[in-house]
Amino acid sequence: MKKPQRDITLRFLAETQDVNFGGKVHGGAVMKWIDLAAYACAAGWSGRYCVTAYAGGIRFIAPIHVGSLVEVDAKVIYTGKSSMHIALEVNACDPKSLNRRLTTNCIVIMVAVDQNGHSEQVPQWVPESEEDIRQNETAKKLMEMRKKIGEEMEVFAD
């Protein structure tokens, strides 16, 4: 059996259609890139079609300029029965200098589903390095925090 792929990096140039009214790459474009990388990472890990269940903690740290070389790094940091928590970082640089800088980071939860939209089991990921263990523990803490936030958000539901 082939070993699942835990991480992936998407690389491309930021294009003019990605620009907002301020002349920088639109946050929505960055979020789309994050979702694409999260999907590719989750599908590579699970070998299944996956859907986005949650995207959170998105921090826009620095702007991305048109023509920048963009790298979206995604890696599995926790697996549940059918879910995969994916940590993502977006870095950008002038392709002539290659001085990368962090622009955005977040966590996305993807769920493997069958052709009817029912969740499917995914391979378990077991952390090995100290960094893996730290990130895995943080993912577990974030799950508890999201549960509390969800309960508080119920006041806005009709």
Image (tube, rainbow, N blue to C red):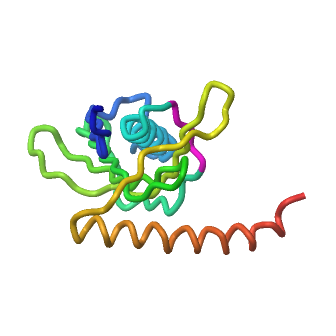
Look at the image and say whether residue 50 sits in the magenta stretch: yes
Percent from the top left, x then y, of residue 69? 23, 38
Percent from the top left, x then y, of residue 103? 33, 55
Whether 155 is drawn above or below 121: the answer is below
Q: In which quadrant will I find the N terminus?
A: top left
Q: Nearer the viewer, residue 14 or 5?
A: 5
Rendered residue at 52%/36% (across/down):
50
Picture quadrant of residue 132? bottom left
Look at the image and say whether residue 96 sits in the magenta stretch: no
SS assignment for the magenta stretch, majority: strand
Q: Which residues are magenta?
A: 49-53
Whether 29 is drawn above or below 150: the answer is above
Relative placement, left or right, of 120 versus 89 is right
Relative placement, left or right, of 49 versus 76 is right
The residue positioned farthest toward the front in the image shown: 1
The residue positioned farthest toward the right in the image shown: 158
Picture quadrant of residue 62? bottom left
Percent from the top left, x then y, of residue 150? 70, 67
Percent from the top left, x then y, of residue 52? 56, 43
Rendered residue at 54%/51% (across/down):
81
**Any part of residue 104 in sight:** no
Rendered residue at 47%/41% (across/down):
35
